[in-house]
Amino acid sequence: MLYKAYEIQRSLMNAGSAWASMMADALTDPRNPWAGVGPSQTIANALDVFAHAAAPRGKPAFGIKVIHVDGTAHAVKETTVVTRPFGDLKMFTHDGLPKNAPRLLIVAPMSGHYATLLRGTVERMLERCVVYITDWADAKYVPLAEGTFDLDDYIDYLTGFLEHIGEGAHMMAVCQPSVPAFAATAIMGAKKHPCRPVTLTMMGGPIDTRESPTAVNDHAITKPYVWFKHNVITTVPTNYPGEGRRVYPGFVQLASFMSMNMASHMMSHYKLFQHMNAGADESAEATKAFYDEYRAVCDLPAEFYLQTVDVVFQRHALPKGEFIHRGQAVDLGAITDTAILCIEGERDDISGIGQTKAALKVTPNLPEDMKQYLLAPEVGHYGIFNGSRWRTSIAPVVEQWIGQFEKKAKGRKLSVVA
């Protein structure tokens, strides 16, 4: 019923958005003798704001065509190099990169938004690295015949993607995937897998949510596991390829995040209206671009979502040494030669201060000179991996960290343990 009710509401909002857009166009059409007269422009702007807020949104494109490095423009090549049912692996490169440029796997969150939310992350790291990124599928488009997808599968996908990239790659996990990326690194380290990452950067990730719990963490622990199973999991309706699949809908996740900062979102749209009235087109377009991305959401497989709630937020299995993958305990002590960089934002309201840094405490066999922590001042969750402070203050630290161990990796002898 939840999904069907949403589909009805979405249809009504789509119609309302189309009507408002049509009326806004009519009020500003030069052929309209009343265009620009009295309050017509103000009314048109108000209708435009509503039309934009209510408009339907599909999967955005990365759209990175050109990148500027040291004042020189380079054409960007985007390729899908691995295709799998629940997620593809994309590669970005350009002709300005040297042949021995570091290779970086960016692990995008499977948390209701598309990987394009990390467009700014990809764009900045692409200046010096060949960038790969996980492009997770919208679960409602994955047929039931493809089976299920949970945390175990997530870890296996990351291992497979690293194997495709080859020896000597680096990995960066943004937010939620810090946990499976951390686990995958430990599993590969225990096996002395030749494709284990040289460095692992975790940004705003919930490694141990007992540290500085946020509203998101509180929501996950104040309700029992069965509450989530019966109240936020629903079935994909018949008008999608994934008909019958149990999912955590993206629209529920979006509503949850929006409600956390509803006053801020309302003010953003009011400022959008003010910018349009003042003719500040660049500011208005920037706000619209942000919400085009922010409101584009996708569904998560129910198995993955519920296991994450249970293992990560309620039982804290990984930092407690109780995380199990394919029947085997994950030993974080097996991480001995993958350098770890943990980055947190001072104003992060999703992952509190200390939650990502906890990874440095639970890797006892990793030398201290292979661990680093960065607390970005006055930066919120989104600002850790996007925006001006990411580009100018945080990304350079990541580049330096990768560069430091890229050289050491050349001499690292890797071998597979059968």
Image: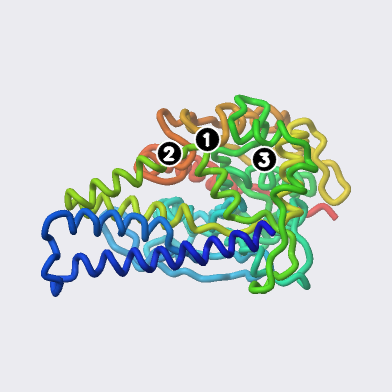
Give x and y (percent) for residue 223. Answer: 73, 35
- Give SS at disc 1: strand
Give x and y (percent) for residue 89. Answer: 59, 64
Q: Quadrant of the N terminus?
A: bottom right
Say whether residue 71 is visible: yes
Give x and y (percent) for residue 411. Answer: 61, 48
Mark 3, residue position: 337
Give x and y (percent) for residue 168. Answer: 61, 53
Query: Badge 3 local density, few (<14 within 10 Å), some, or many (20+)?
Result: some
Say whether residue 333 is visible: no
- In the displayed orientation, state which residue is furthest to the right: 327
Q: Residue at x 59, y 27 (%)?
A: 354
Q: Quadrant of the C terminus?
A: bottom right
Amino acid type at circle 1 is Ile
- Give SS at disc 2: helix
Q: Which label was assigned to residue 381?
A: none
Mark 1, residue position: 343
Q: Earlier in the sequence, mark 1 or mark 2?
A: 1
Amino acid type at circle 3 is Asp
Q: Nearer the viewer, residue 369 or 230?
A: 230
Amino acid type at circle 2 is Ile
Mark 2, residue position: 394
Q: Earlier in the sequence, mark 3 or mark 1?
A: 3
Cα distance between the residues tagged 1 and 2: 8 Å
Cα distance between the residues tagged 3 and 1: 19 Å
Cα distance between the residues tagged 2 and 3: 23 Å
**Would you identify the image quadrant in which residue 340 lies?**
top right
Looking at the image, do the residues carrying marks 3 and 1 touch, with CB atoms under 8 Å apart? Answer: no
Looking at the image, do the residues carrying marks 2 and 3 touch, with CB atoms under 8 Å apart? Answer: no
Q: Residue at x 78, y 34 (%)?
A: 315
Q: Is residue 277 left or right of residue 99?
A: left
Q: Residue at x 46, y 52 (%)?
A: 294
